[in-house]
Image (spheres, rainbow, N blue to C red):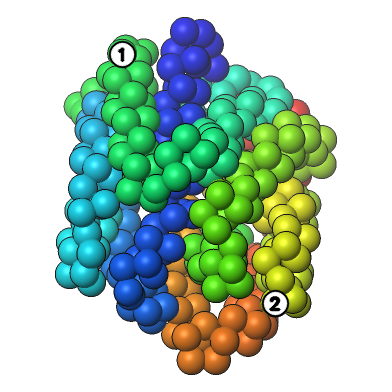
Amino acid sequence: MKSPSTWRLRGACFGQFVAIGILATFEAVFMKEQGLGETMIGLIIGLGTAMVTVTALFWARVVDRGASEEKIIALGFLFGAVGLATLPFCSSPLGFSLNIAFRGLTIPMAFALMPSLAVSRLGTSSQGSRYARYRQWGSAGFVLGTMVLPFLVDDIRGVFWLAAVFLLGAAVLITLDRKPSSTAMQDRKRVPIKWSRSLVTFLMANFVVGLAIPAMFGFFFVYARTMGADTILIGFLAGSNGIIAILALPLMGRVVDRFGVRRVLWLAFAAQPVRLLVISLAPSYWWLFAAQPLHLFTFAGYDIASVLYISRHVSAENRATAQAMLGATRMGGVFVGAILTGYLAENNGYPYMYHVIAGLTLIGLLAYMIGLRGQPPLKPVYGQPVKHAP
């Protein structure tokens, strides 16, 4: 990637993850404070993720057919800001459902397409390290949204409004980015995706990764709240993810370049059930910090390796669709996981819920390992040469 476009892209990623950090940390907590139960919270979050699963693929196909990627992303950030600005006015299941449905329809225009835009601007070597540097800015935004902003505004509604401002800033940065990324529609070739066994099983495993996300993030913070954690401590708990990611992303980028995406993905899938089991053993909310170091593998390693792994299964003509498939299958898992997690937590308690979800994540590891059997070396990203692609 090259400046000044690089800095605008990183700045937009920063603003995007300020909002993601705030939503992942405080949305479920805010619903709980408005009197909603865990099952209802899971259903509402599931509604949004179901919409994201469908709309992400739609917007990706629009881009792959020649639409301006930058214009669509900028509109997605703008609509996302509107959704976050109106979220504090919600107080009933209907209000939350309408808000999350609006965001599920529009936010994928930005969130689902940003990785595709970033990957398209990687160089021809050290792709893991280059993508990691881009994602570091997102982690820095996550830390700001979860640890700093709650100090400045000790009110969840005010934090949502600040998140909306950052999304507006991201929209401006992408609007100013005039570097062309899309081929004209009449020149864009239609190349079918080859559905290899390794691609299909990886997407299945990615679905299971999504299944565990509500337990590791949204309900994780609700669990901390039920143990007595206040808003600031919850912010620190969430912000520790961002701090670990900032430190871990460069390391995991170099590890991906040195050892290949397949080995890093194996570590990420194996670490997921361990992280969930550690959470299940928590006697108090302070113990929850013990699970956070595994963010090194379950997020930093997985985020870099999964984006590059799926990119090496498709041609450049399907780059947006590939990243959307990655996001859509994961969000499909979030949809099922949010409902299942909420039901189990409300009816059987949080430790039991974490045991069940940990067991299910082993299916993802198994699916991934089955897909690797007898597979040839991976292709480079979008036809670009790469030194290490095992």
Residue 244: quarter of image = top right
- Residue 374 in picture, x, y percent from top left: 73, 62
Answer with mark 2 or mark 1, whichever residue precedes in sequence: 1
Where is residue 295? Give x, y as percent. Answer: 70, 52
Write the residue at 78% across / 35% down: 251
> Local crowd at mark 2 within 10 Å, few (<14), some, or many (≥20)?
some
SS of the residue at dot 2?
helix
Q: Relative to 310, is 317 above or below? A: above
Q: Quadrant of residue 196?
A: bottom right
Farthest top residue in view: 4
The residue nearer to you, when weighing 34 against 259, is 34
Seen at 46% across and 22% down, the residue is 11
Total numbered circles? 2
Image-based side of 286 in relation to 185, left or right:
right
Image side of residue 209 versus residue 126, left or right: left
Residue with the mark numbered 2: 280
Q: Residues within 10 Å of mark 1 (few under 14, many from 20)?
A: some
**Disc number placed over residue 99 in the picture, else none:** none
**Three-letter amino acid code at the position of disc 2:** Ser
User: Residue 243's spot in the image, x, y percent?
Assistant: 68, 39
| Horizontal and vertical percent position of residue 153 | 42, 39
Say what secondary structure mark 1 lies in: helix
- As drawn, the residue found furthest toward the bottom would be 347
The residue labelled by disc 1 is: 176
277 or 287: nearer the viewer: 287
Residue 289's place in the image compared with 112, above or below, is below
Quarter the N terminus occupies: top right
Question: What residue type is disc 1 on?
Answer: Leu
Q: Name the one closer to the observer, 262 or 327.
A: 327
